[in-house]
Image: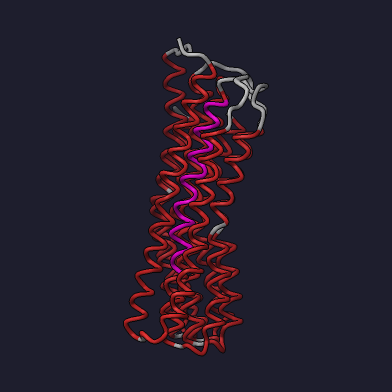
Amino acid sequence: MNIAGPDFIKGLAFLGAGLAMGLGAIGPGVGEGFAAGKACEAIGRKPEEAGLLTRTMLVGQAVSESTGIYSLVVALLLLFVV
Amino acid sequence: MLNTATYISASSFLGAALAIGFGAIGAAVGEGYAAGLANQALSFRPEKSGDVLKNMLVGQAIAESAAIFALVVAILLLFSTPQPKTVLIAWAAIGAGLSMGLSAIGSGVGAGLPAGSACVGIVRQPQNANKVLTTMLIGSAVCQTPAIFGMVIAFLLLFLDFSNMPVYPGWAALLGAGLATGLAAGGPGVGNGLTSREAVTGVARNPEAGTETNRVMLIGLSVGQSTAIYGFLISLLLVFTGLEKSTSLSDSFRLLGAGLSSGFGGIGPGVGLGVVAAYACKWVARRPEATGILTRTMLVGMAVTESTSIYALIVALLLVIVF
């Protein structure tokens, strides 16, 4: 295998993009699932508060999503900018 | 200097070890969980030992199947002697071992969870034993799906003819295919197990809501599979996309990166989706009149939880198709 400098950088940037997005998706996935699960539990206890609970769930999930979006941004930077 | 046949047999042995080494983890943990809860159940009501033992053994047998898939793939890798046409067969053997071994972890753990809660359930409410057993069997069986995806990819890697695929970057495509399905299957396996566990407990508490609980469980289980399906999709793309010969490092690493992205990306959302559906099943069983609002909230929550695995899928597709 014949490796030149720019090719080496490009190759590791691709590998890094995959790792950034892949590993970065683990935490938000578990966290958002927990938030939604507890929202289901709360709606089961008090179905009449479903609107408030769904809204709170979505706000909480949006915040928990943020690290996943950071990973996506870094992965896209590695793919298209580096 | 080593020849192609030597590389192939050495890699087949490594692949066999990876398949059964990783593959044995999950089933053992799941079966141990089932046995532990069976003992806990018997401490409440020792006179039910016959029913509990039967239920524990059925549940453990289903959890065992993930490890048996891994054993089959390991034995195939040990004893098949392919024609040494291309060194890619060696990479395919490692990919097959990773795909089968890693995917069996989640399914083995997952299938054990409903078996354990079923043992407790039939002791608490012996008159509902049949309904509990039915829900347990459905849940444990669906938990095996990610391991079956892993086995399909392992068989494809073992039996396809790669003599027309260029060695560079083909090696990375085959390794990436194994990693994508193997890693991504871990999350949904565990997630499905969490969902089925709560559904089994719910049916045992309130068998009148059995129909609603089973329905919500099946919706939750099928949506929970989606991240394993993304990994499976990327594996199929990596195996079947026509590759151009290229000795540059970036062409190899983009394919490996695609496998790692969709593979790791499936783990977290897979577990998270299972947690959402678990709480929904728990509360549908307690309050079947709120099934509508609970199902709706579950699906909205699952859609948001899914998002990071979709980002991972997009990054993987960009790496495979665009670059």
The answer to whether one can see residue B49 in this image is yes
Left or right: B35 with respect to B217?
Answer: left
* Quarter of the figure that contains the C terminus of chain B: top right
Question: Can you say whether B62 is above or below B235 in the image?
Answer: below
The answer to whether one can see residue B234 in this image is no
Image-quadrant location for residue B314: top right
Instruction: Please check the rendered image and state whether residue B73 is part of the magenta-colored stretch, yes or no.
Output: no
The one of B66 and B249 positioned closer to us in this rendering: B66
The one of B65 and A19 positioned closer to us in this rendering: B65
Left or right: B157 with respect to B249?
Answer: right
Question: Can you say whether A81 is above or below B21 in the image?
Answer: above
Question: Can you say whether B211 is above or below B80 in the image?
Answer: below
* Quarter of the figure that contains the N terminus of chain B: top left
Percent x, y for residue B157?
60, 35
Residue at the spot x=58%, y=51% of the render? B148
Image-quadrant location for residue B92: top right
Instruction: Please check the rendered image and state whether residue B111 is part of the magenta-colored stretch, yes or no.
Output: yes
Residue at the spot x=62%, y=33% of the render? B321
For the image shown, how many numbered marks are present on the structure?
0
Which residues lie in the magenta part?
B89-113
Is most of the magenta stretch helix, strand or loop?
A: helix
